[in-house]
Image: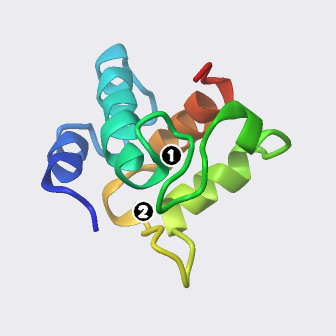
Amino acid sequence: MRSLAALLILAALPAGAGEITAADATRLSHLVEQDCGSCHGLTRKGGLGSPLTREALDGQDRETLATIILDGMPGSAMPPWRPIMTEEEAYWIADYLLEAEK
C-alpha cells in the first residue's frame, strides 16, 4: 500500500514536466529511501520486495525497471505507480537505483 507521504511527495512534483530538477531529485531520492524502502528494505537489501542493490540489479536495463515502477508486478505486492508518477520520474528512479552505491 502506498503511504500518504509518497502521495504528498509526488503531488509536489510537476506533472509531465519532462525534466527532473534538483528539488525533484531530492524528493524522488527520499521516496526511494523511505517508501520503496518500506518493502525493499531501508538499505534496499530486500524485505517483502526483492533487493534493489546495484548487485541485485546487475544486468537490468533502465527501461525494464521504469516499466516495473510504472506498471507494478501483477501477482506481487509491487503496485503500479503510473497513476501518480511520470515516465521521467520512473526513469530517474531506475537510473538512481542502477547507480546507487548502497
Q: Residue 82 carries which label?
A: 2
33 or 80, which lies in front? 33
Residue displayed at 34% across by 65% down: 83
Query: How many marks overall?
Result: 2
- Asked which quadrant contains residue 22, the reply is top left
Point out the tag, 2 or 1, that comes first from the N-terminus.
2
The spot of residue 89 in percent (x, y) is 45, 41
Q: Which residue lies furthest to the bottom in this view?
A: 75
Classify residue 70 as left or right of residue 94. left
Looking at the rendered image, the quarter that the C terminus falls into is: top right
Q: Distance between the residues labelled 2 and 1?
A: 9 Å
Q: Which mark is residue 4?
A: none
Please rate how many residues cluster around mark 1, counting C-alpha atoms within 10 Å: few if below 14, some from 14 to 19, many from 20.
many
96 or 13, which lies in front? 96
For mark 1, what is the residue? Answer: 90
- Give, as a three-letter code, the residue at label 1: Ala
36 or 20, which lies in front? 36
* Badge 2 element: helix
38 or 78, which lies in front? 38
